[in-house]
Amino acid sequence: MNFSRFFPCLFRKMPGGLLLLNLSMLSGCAINPATKKVEFMIVSEEKEFKIGQGVDKQVREDMGVYLELPELRSFVKKMVDAIGRQSDRPELIYRLEIIDTPDFNAFAVPGGFIYVHRGLLERMNSSDELASVLGHEIAHVSVRHSAAQISKSQLLNIGLIGLAVA
């Protein structure tokens, strides 16, 4: 029987059909919201959000949140919401926090959590520059980059355990 027709995303990108057949009971395929292509994905959107919540808690504890200018946070949040509504995952609630560090950085974590460092905002010259950075981070969330990396890592770990047992 040709199982590749039932699990095309597994057989198209990865060798070792027998191992993948066994893994197919534990894994799945999902349609990437941006590319509309079927991809290997173990991490559900619910799991993705829970991972993001855990990272969010750690980020807040380790890096601190900038609270001095609530109107700045409100401005950036409105921009995140506007860009998020135009993203490939418009139904997702994108959460924003400004990190209280002078670093020139921004990042996103699974589940729609977007972080902008205070230092980046201090060096911005226009709202267009900010929109570009926020769009980039929202795109990472929209195409589920972190969830895909976690899925591949889990598959690799399962494969390594299978090899060790064999």
Image: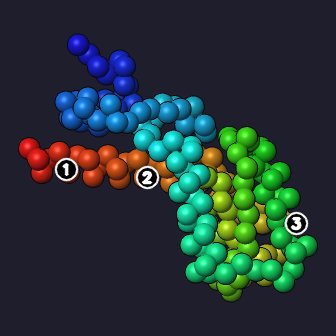
Which of the 4 quarters of the picture holds residue 123?
bottom right
Farthest residue, direction right: 71
Image point 52% across, 48% down: which residue? Answer: 47
Nearest the viewer among 94 and 118 is 94
Which of the 4 quarters of the picture holds residue 103?
bottom right
Pointer 1 with pointer 2, Cβ within 8 A: no
Nearest the viewer among 73 and 120 is 73
Residue 149: x and y, percent? 43, 52
Where does label 2 land, which residue? 149
For badge 3, the amino acid type reads Phe
The label shown at residue 75 is 3
Local SS, label 2? helix
Where does label 1 land, which residue? 161
For badge 2, the amino acid type reads Gln
**Dot 2 alpha-carbon crowd within 10 angstroms: few under 14, some 14 to 19, many 20 or more:** some
Marks 2 and 3 sit apart, C-alpha to C-alpha, by: 31 Å
